[in-house]
Image: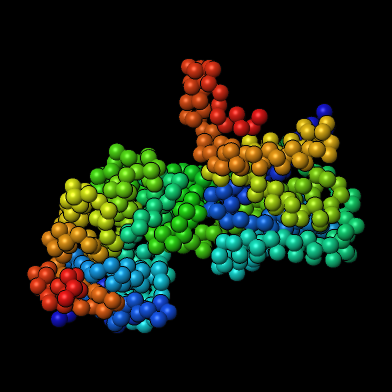
């Protein structure tokens, strides 16, 4: 049991959140092990993104406990959670306008750049070396997600599919142990969806990222996930392997209606 | 000749404050209408420490910078927790409060009667390297992680925070930096004008600086510099038009904001490589006018 617990990256117990009278998330529980890909699916408005926002500290939880690598991060500030090793993307793309693709990624590498405000102002050699190292890191990340060719373009002027990839590169720049992907394939055409699936697989199998994934495209969720949670109306209605979930009567009811 | 030297000195003093506002309002998107207050703090700290305590000029300027910087931390701590629009209001209130306080402490500051007989130490050869130094610092600020994080925060605070940027701390550092530059400009101004009265550091000064930054383009430091040159000299150039000059000045700003919302220079920065590109373009197609200059006329 101890060995299994050692692999536990993220655990969530009894997470609740209400907006006014709407119970957006009710008693949500989760266990995410190292090197696993866990999926979170459910109909629109089921509370999936709210779960992400609660776990990444963007909105405070009403109750519940979130533990990441043995550390209690419940209601911790979102930048602290990011620095502890949870990187995330946003469903409705939140790239920084006015910055190039490379600078968008660099902006997220802030806490490991490692030069002071003073050396930034004076342009000291130490800062220039660090910037050079940063450039190398960014090139590597852009290569990894396959967008090296648009390094110097304005991030927000790129086609939608590429913007999704910039989001992922930016999340990777925070040196995450665990990656939260909020509908990475939303709004993509079928060939782009296939590409995204390859990318997510690569991140998991070759780069060994643990991933928590929200997605509507079942052709993405089913092949990559080890474990799937299904939510509806804020409640967790099913949990299991992709095969178990697909044949679960509650899930069929939620998706297809009665 | 002295007239032009004085005009240039005044312009360089404004420039020192404006580049600080460029970092704060242009890049980070925080509207401070209290920069005049920081200038007043810098000016009175520097001038009084020199006149009353005999602190030498460079050290007095430094004291002014430290005073403005530390007051900005005191104000920033509560004010930067507010939403951006309330931050603007809070800084406006702060700036007005500072000038009101200085007007009340008649024994120390001379109140509305002003403070006469200030020695004149700020000459052109002082103001020039100081302004150049300020531009150098802000140019490095923009190029470094500070600039990227500022633009990220200006665009999407929530995403910036979720990607590991300590937004509050970053804003605090930038606010103190710009207040320090305002304090420096204030100190230099104090030792330039012989006579000082708190009202010269009122909200109009703060607003002018914000307008200057927007006029030049919020992403371009070069824009802020050019726009300071234009807007500070314009009242002098338009002197022939006497009372109409304020109207012309205002109309020009309104026209620019409407016809060119990205500001005079947009994103363009003067660097060694961009200057080379510009030079080549001018030589190949000499007939093509520069779009940035068209708007100025």
Measuring from the top left, give residue A138's x and y in whole percent.
33, 47
Q: Nearer the viewer, residue A187 or A58?
A: A187
Res. B256 image quadrant: top right
Residue drawn at x 60%, y 42% as measured from the top left: B258
Horizontal relation, residue A191 to residue B67: left or right? left
Q: Is residue A18 above or below residue B272?
A: below
Applied colour scheme: rainbow
Horizontal relation, residue A174 to residue A42: left or right? right
Q: Nearer the viewer, residue B67 or B11?
A: B11
Residue drawn at x 53%, y 21% as measured from the top left: B288
Res. A132 image quadrant: top left
Measuring from the top left, give residue B238's x and y in whole percent.
78, 33
Q: Which of B293 and A103 is in front in this view?
A: B293
Measuring from the top left, give residue A177's x and y in whole percent.
27, 63
How many numbered circles does the render carry?
0
Residue drawn at x 55%, y 53% as measured from the top left: B29
**Which quadrant does the N terminus of chain A fall into?**
bottom left
Horizontal relation, residue B3 to residue A174: left or right? right
In the rendered image, is residue B136 in sight?
no
Residue drawn at x 54%, y 33% as measured from the top left: B270
Residue extending farthest front: A258
Q: Is residue B116 above or below residue B94?
A: above
Measuring from the top left, give residue B23's x and y in whole percent.
57, 49
Q: Which of A74 and B181 is in front in this view?
A: A74
**Which quadrant does the C terminus of chain A fall into?**
bottom left
Q: In this view, does B289 lie above or below A16?
A: above
Q: Is residue A251 above or below residue B153?
A: below
Horizontal relation, residue A154 to residue A168: left or right? right
In the rendered image, is residue B200 in sight?
yes
């Amino acid at each position: 049991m101890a060995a299994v617990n050692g692999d536990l990256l993220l655990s969530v117990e009894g997470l609740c959140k209400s907006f006014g009278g709407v119970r957006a998330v009710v008693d949500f529980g989760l266990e995410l092990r190292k090197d696993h890909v866990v999926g979170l699916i459910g109909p629109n408005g089921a509370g999936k993104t709210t779960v992400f926002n609660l776990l990444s500290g963007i909105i405070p939880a009403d109750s519940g406990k979130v533990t990441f690598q043995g550390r209690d991060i419940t209601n911790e500030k979102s930048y602290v959670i990011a620095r502890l090793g949870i990187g995330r993307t946003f469903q409705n793309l939140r790239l920084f306008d006015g910055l190039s693709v490379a600078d968008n990624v660099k902006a997220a590498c802030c806490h490991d750049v490692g030069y002071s405000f003073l050396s930034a102002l004076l342009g000291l050699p130490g800062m220039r070396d660090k910037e050079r190292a940063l450039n190398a890191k960014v090139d590597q990340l852009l290569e990894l997600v396959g967008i090296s060719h648009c390094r110097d373009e304005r991030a927000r002027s790129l086609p939608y599919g590429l913007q999704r990839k910039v989001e992922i590169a930016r999340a990777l720049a925070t040196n995450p142990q665990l990656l939260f992907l909020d509908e990475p394939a939303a709004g993509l055409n079928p060939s782009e969806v296939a590409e995204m699936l390859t990318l997510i697989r690569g991140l998991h199998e070759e780069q060994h990222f643990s991933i928590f994934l929200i997605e509507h495209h079942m052709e993405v969720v089913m092949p990559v996930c080890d474990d799937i949670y299904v939510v509806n109306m804020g409640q967790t209605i099913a949990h299991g392997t992709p095969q178990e979930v697909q044949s679960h009567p509650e899930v069929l009811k939620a998706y297809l209606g009665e | 000749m002295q007239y032009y030297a004085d005009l240039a000195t005044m312009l360089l003093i404004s420039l020192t404050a404006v580049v600080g506002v460029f970092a704060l309002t242009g890049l980070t998107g925080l509207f401070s209408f209290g920069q005049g207050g920081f200038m007043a703090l810098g000016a009175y700290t520097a001038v009084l420490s020199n006149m009353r305590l005999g602190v030498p000029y460079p050290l007095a300027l430094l004291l002014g910078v430290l005073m403005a910087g530390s007051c900005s931390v005191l104000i920033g701590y509560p004010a930067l927790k507010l939403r951006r629009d309330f931050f603007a209001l809070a800084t406006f209130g702060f700036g007005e409060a500072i000038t009101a306080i200085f007007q009340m402490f008649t024994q120390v500051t001379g109140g509305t009667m002003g403070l006469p007989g200030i020695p004149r130490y700020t000459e052109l050869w002082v103001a020039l390297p100081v302004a150049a130094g300020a531009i150098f610092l802000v140019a490095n600020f923009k190029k470094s992680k500070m600039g990227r994080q500022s633009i990220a925060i200006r665009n999407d605070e929530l995403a910036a925070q979720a990607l590991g940027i300590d937004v509050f701390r970053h804003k605090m550092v930038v606010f103190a930096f710009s207040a320090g530059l305002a304090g420096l400009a204030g100190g230099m101004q104090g030792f330039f004008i012989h006579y000082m009265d708190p009202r010269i550091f009122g909200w109009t000064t703060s607003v002018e600086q914000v307008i200057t930054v927007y006029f030049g383009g919020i992403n371009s430091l070069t824009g802020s510099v050019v726009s300071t040159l234009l807007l500070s000299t314009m009242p002098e150039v338009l002197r022939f038009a006497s009372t109409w000059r304020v109207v012309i000045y205002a109309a020009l700003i309104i026209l620019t904001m409407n016809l060119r919302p990205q500001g005079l220079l947009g994103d363009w920065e003067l660097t060694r490589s961009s200057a080379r590109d510009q030079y080549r373009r001018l030589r190949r197609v000499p007939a093509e006018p520069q779009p940035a200059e068209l708007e100025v006329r």
